[in-house]
Image (cartoon, grey):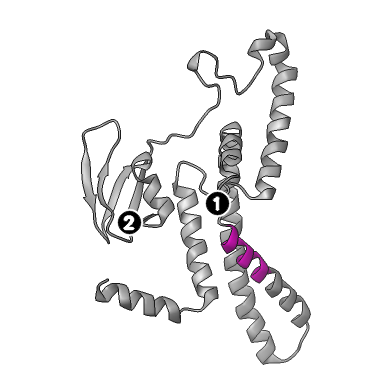
Amino acid sequence: MDIDDILAEVTADAIPQEQKDLQQLTRSWVAERVAPELLAWPEELMERVLERIRKQIELVEDQTGNMDPKTNFKLIIIQTELERFKFLVRSFLRARLKKIDQHALHYKQQHEASQTTSTPLLSPNEYQYLTAHEALLSTHYTSSFLSQFPANLQRLDDTTGGVSMVDKPDEDAAVFVRALKDVGQIFVEGTEKKFEIRRGDVYVVRWSAIRRWVELGDLELI
């Protein structure tokens, strides 16, 4: 561990939890908007953020109408901070819902596979939305044209013949990443290209090549 790492740890300990959550939420928001795939649901972070938003809304409602100038000024600051958190949460959820709408069957399979891990892909509300969205689409497709097909051709998740009917996001889409730690050599699958990523480096590279390090927190999407 070098002096920069020690200073970073000391600085991190001095930052209030609310500020840490805001930084983490901002990074999650940027990453979700940039990543071609849906990222794991940040359960602990969102629980803290949503609870803080709820308490701040209650505080604003309780203090509204107080004629004390000091209280009114404090409420303006709280409301400004509240709107910043609400904007990030709304935009973050919209980015996730857009991906769910585009590849519902794929993410349903991914979420069910992630249920055995400590980091499920979707929140309970997102999974409920996904299943309702999938049911509506299935009903619409069946009434529109699938009912006219033979029974063995009506499945939307058919994999007969080694060809999957489930549409997936583009895993080879290019993304910009910044190294938070020394990662070492990265190999780009399907090519002979390899390069070394060191702390502070910024690269544009295939998502499939760096997905694992983004999930580990060694790289961040920008």
Residue 11 drawn at (x, y percent) = 39, 79
SS label for mark 1: loop
Q: Residue 212 versus residue 76: which sits nearer the camera?
A: 212
Residue 149 drawn at (x, y percent) = 68, 9
Q: CA distance from mark 1 to mark 2?
A: 23 Å
Q: Residue at x 32, y 78 (%)?
A: 7
Mark 1 vs 2: CB contact within 8 A: no
Q: Is residue 143 visible?
A: yes
Q: Is residue 51 magenta?
A: yes
Q: Residue at x 56, y 60 (%)?
A: 88
Q: Residue at x 27, y 74 (%)?
A: 4
Residue flagged by tag 1: what amino acid is it? Thr
Q: Which residue is mark 2?
A: 178
Residue 200 drawn at (x, y percent) = 27, 61
Q: Residue at x 59, y 49 (%)?
A: 94
Q: Residues within 10 Å of mark 1 (few under 14, many from 20)?
A: some
Q: Is residue 137 magenta?
A: no
Q: Is residue 222 visible?
A: no
Q: Which residue is mark 1?
A: 119
* For residue 23, above or below residue 177: below
Task: Indicate the quadrant where residue 97 lies.
Answer: top right
SS label for mark 2: strand
Q: Residue 138 versus residue 112: which sits nearer the camera?
A: 112
Magenta region: which residues? 43-53
Residue 150 drawn at (x, y percent) = 68, 7
Residue flagged by tag 2: what amino acid is it? Arg
Left or right position of 151 against 94: right
Q: Quadrant of the C terminus?
A: bottom left
